[in-house]
Amino acid sequence: MIAAVDGELTCKCLGTIDDQPYLLSGNELFQPIYLTGKEVHIWGIVIHTIHYENERCMIGLIDCNNFYVSCERVFNPKLEGKPIGILSTNNS
């Protein structure tokens, strides 16, 4: 997922360690990010990536419906803390 943690964007997987929420990296060189007590906004979900073996290039397709909600909450603070559903009809 694409998330803003305390204002910094990151691309990680949501998981748990000892029943506590963490963002986990696919790269073992990066430490898990403990989420309790942090401000976390989910911007979108990575639904597909393309890796090229011979080049230093990766392309990701991101479903950014949550991004639109995050933006709407900036413009309409009354929505903060309220559940919001996303509907789409442009599935092909």
Image (cartoon, helix red, strand yellow):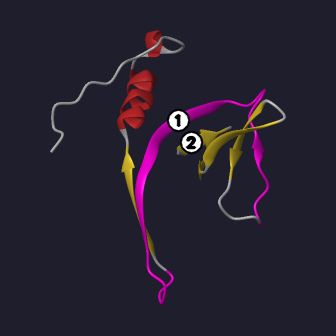
| Residue located 56% across and 42% down the image | 3
Q: Is mark 2 on a helix, strand or loop?
A: strand
Residue 49 place in picture, x, y as percent: 42, 63
Gap in angstroms between the C-alphas marked 1 and 2: 4 Å
Q: Do the residues labelled 1 and 2 touch (CB within 8 Å)?
A: yes
User: Which amino acid lies under the numbered mark 1 shown in the image of this protein?
Assistant: Ile
Relative vertical location of residue 48 with respect to residue 36 in this rendering, above or below: below
Relative vertical location of residue 46 with respect to residue 84 in this rendering, above or below: below
Q: Does the magenta stretch include residue 51?
A: yes
Residue to which mark 2 is pinned: 3
Residue 28 place in picture, x, y as percent: 75, 64
Residue 76 place in picture, x, y as percent: 40, 17
Relative vertical location of residue 48 with respect to residue 59 in this rendering, above or below: above
Residue to which mark 1 is pinned: 42
Residue 41 place in picture, x, y as percent: 56, 33
Does residue 45 appear in the picture of this structure?
yes
Relative vertical location of residue 56 with respect to residue 38 in this rendering, above or below: below
| Residue located 45% across and 44% down the image | 45
Position of 80 with respect to 28 (left or right) is left
Of label 1 and label 2, which has the lower sequence position?
Answer: 2
Residues rendered magenta in the picture = 29-56
User: Which amino acid lies under the numbered mark 2 shown in the image of this protein?
Assistant: Ala
Q: Is mark 1 on a helix, strand or loop?
A: strand
Q: Does the magenta stretch include residue 53?
A: yes
| Residue located 26% across and 24% down the image | 87
Position of 36 with respect to 54 (left or right) is right
* Residue placed furthest toward the right: 18
Give residue 52's quadrant in the image: bottom left
Give residue 92's quadrant in the image: top left
Position of 50 with respect to 23 (left or right) is left
